[in-house]
Image (cartoon, helix red, strand yellow):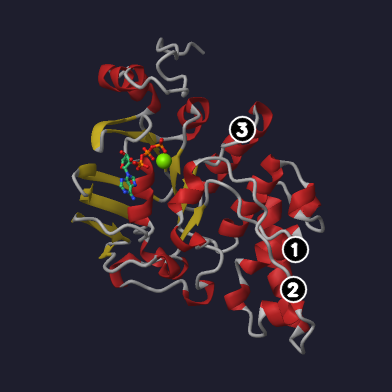
């Protein structure tokens, strides 16, 4: 069985993935819903908090005493000019990068010794900047890989036509179809990723993270390579998702950020320079100065009309 990665990686995301681990896909969905004392879903304490995170790479301080939080029902945008530390922050949240200082708390419990393969068990899923789908599997099979550890009879044995439980397969497929449906991609279930437009592939990758029913979803530039119409749909999908989970969104497309985020944290040179609602962030002089000073900036924020929007 050949399972090659579809390679339409577009940007820095691939460099952010030591070992190309596909978070939320090949980790341990079977072990999730770990109750964490005071913080399980039943208690309603779906809050993620980062406190005083500092990351140094040699002499460079990529993150400097960064604190932020996000709760269920919220979309938190994390923005900032190139090199501000957004990806480093995401990597800390996912356990890729160990901070020199600071702490992470999830559902009221400290996340100590966080490792990427433990994330799914904690109800945390991440989409990659690219898509990372398996070219040799259909769309629905790709999404099912996000669930394979749930199956009593393994998903891979099913693919290899070994004896297995048909019932398990059916349940997995139903869940995968529901996840595809939630991102409007159910109609592509039987197709192979390579035959689909890039924005559809991104939606399938999102479905694969959603099939785990995460409580915290980390979206790494979900609009990368996506056109305007698809971006509107993506915005609606993200808003819809936030009803069931907390969402952290790293994104350069300011239209999307401004329309879907409840709050935004702005990083510049590793420091938090602003926190606020989209309207507050648009008008924050420090934020505008940070973007104006970024010669490579193509976010449009510095050019954005900062006047209040009339109804
Ligand atoms: N592994 C690493 N080793 C050394 N320096 C690093 C490493 N990863 C990131 N950096 C540096 O840390 C700083 C923050 O980088 P990071 O990738 O987090 O920025 P970013 O906000 O994601 O930027 P972009 O918008 O361009 O993706 C940059 O100066 C970058 O060069
Ligand atoms: Mg980055």
Q: Is mark 3 within 8 Å of ligand 1?
A: no
- Relative horizontal placement of residue 87, taking residue 181 as reference (left or right): left
SS label for mark 3: helix
Relative depth, front residue between 133 and 275: 133
Please give the label number shown on residue 136.
1
For the residues labelled 3 and 1, the Cα–Cα distance comes to: 27 Å
Quick one: label 3 or label 2, which is nearer the N terminus?
A: 2
Residue drawn at (61%, 38%), measured in percent from left and top?
Answer: 234
Is 307 left or right of 54, judged from the image as shown? right
- Mark 2 surroundings: few (<14), some (14-19) or many (≥20) residues within 10 A: few
Where is residue 184? Give x, y as percent.
71, 46
- Image depth: mark 3 or mark 2 in front: 2
Name the residue carrying label 2: 1
Is 234 above or below relative to 142? above
**Residue depicted at 29% across the width and 17% down the height:** 289
Q: Earlier in the sequence, mark 3 or mark 1?
A: 1
Dots 3, 2 in contact, CB < 8 A: no
- Whether pointer 2 and pointer 1 mark residues with C-beta atoms closer than 8 Å, the reply is yes
Whether 203 is drawn above or below 2: the answer is above
Residue 1's image quarter?
A: bottom right
Which residue is painted at 25% across and 38% down in the image? 270
For the residue labelled by badge 1, is the local secondary structure a helix, a strand or a loop? loop
- Where residue 46 appears, as percent x and y from the top left, is 37, 57
Q: Is residue 183 visible in this depiction of the protein?
A: no
Residue count near mark 3 (Cα–Cα under 10 Å), binned few <14, some 14–19, many ≥20: some
Residue 274 figure quarter = top left
Which residue is denoted by mark 3 in the rendering? Answer: 231
- CA gap, disc 3 and disc 2: 34 Å
C-alpha span from label 2 to label 1: 8 Å
Callout 2 secondary element: loop
Q: Is residue 276 left or right of residue 30?
A: left
Quarter of the image where ligand 2 sits: top left
């Amino acid at each position: 069985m050949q399972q090659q990665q579809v390679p339409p990686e577009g940007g820095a995301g691939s460099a952010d993935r030591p070992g190309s681990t596909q978070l939320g896909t090949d980790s341990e969905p079977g072990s999730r819903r770990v109750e964490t004392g005071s913080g399980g879903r039943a208690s309603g304490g779906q809050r993620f908090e980062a406190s005083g995170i500092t990351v140094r790479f040699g002499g460079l301080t990529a993150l400097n005493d960064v604190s932020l939080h996000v709760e269920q029902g919220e979309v938190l945008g994390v923005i900032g000019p190139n090199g501000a530390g957004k990806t480093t922050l995401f990597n800390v949240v996912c356990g890729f990068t160990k901070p020199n200082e600071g702490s992470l708390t999830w559902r009221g419990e400290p996340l100590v010794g966080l490792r990427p393969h433990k994330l799914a068990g904690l109800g945390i899923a991440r989409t990659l900047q690219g898509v990372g789908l398996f070219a040799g599997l259909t769309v629905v099979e790709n999404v099912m890989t996000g669930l394979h550890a749930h199956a009593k009879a393994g998903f891979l044995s099913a693919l290899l036509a070994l004896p297995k439980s048909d019932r398990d397969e059916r349940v997995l497929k139903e869940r995968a179809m529901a996840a595809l449906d939630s991102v409007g991609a159910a109609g592509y279930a039987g197709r192979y990723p390579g035959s689909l437009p890039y924005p559809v592939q991104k939606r399938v990758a999102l479905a694969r993270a959603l099939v785990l029913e995460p409580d915290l979803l980390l979206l790494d530039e979900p609009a990368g390579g996506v056109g305007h119409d698809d971006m509107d749909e993506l915005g609606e999908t993200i808003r819809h998702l936030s009803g069931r989970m907390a969402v952290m969104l790293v994104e350069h497309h300011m239209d999307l950020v401004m329309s879907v985020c409840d709050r935004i944290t702005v990083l510049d040179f590793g420091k938090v320079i602003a926190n606020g609602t989209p309207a507050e962030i648009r008008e924050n002089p420090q934020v505008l100065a940070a973007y104006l000073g970024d010669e490579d900036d193509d976010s449009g924020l510095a050019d954005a009309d900062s006047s209040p929007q009339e109804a």
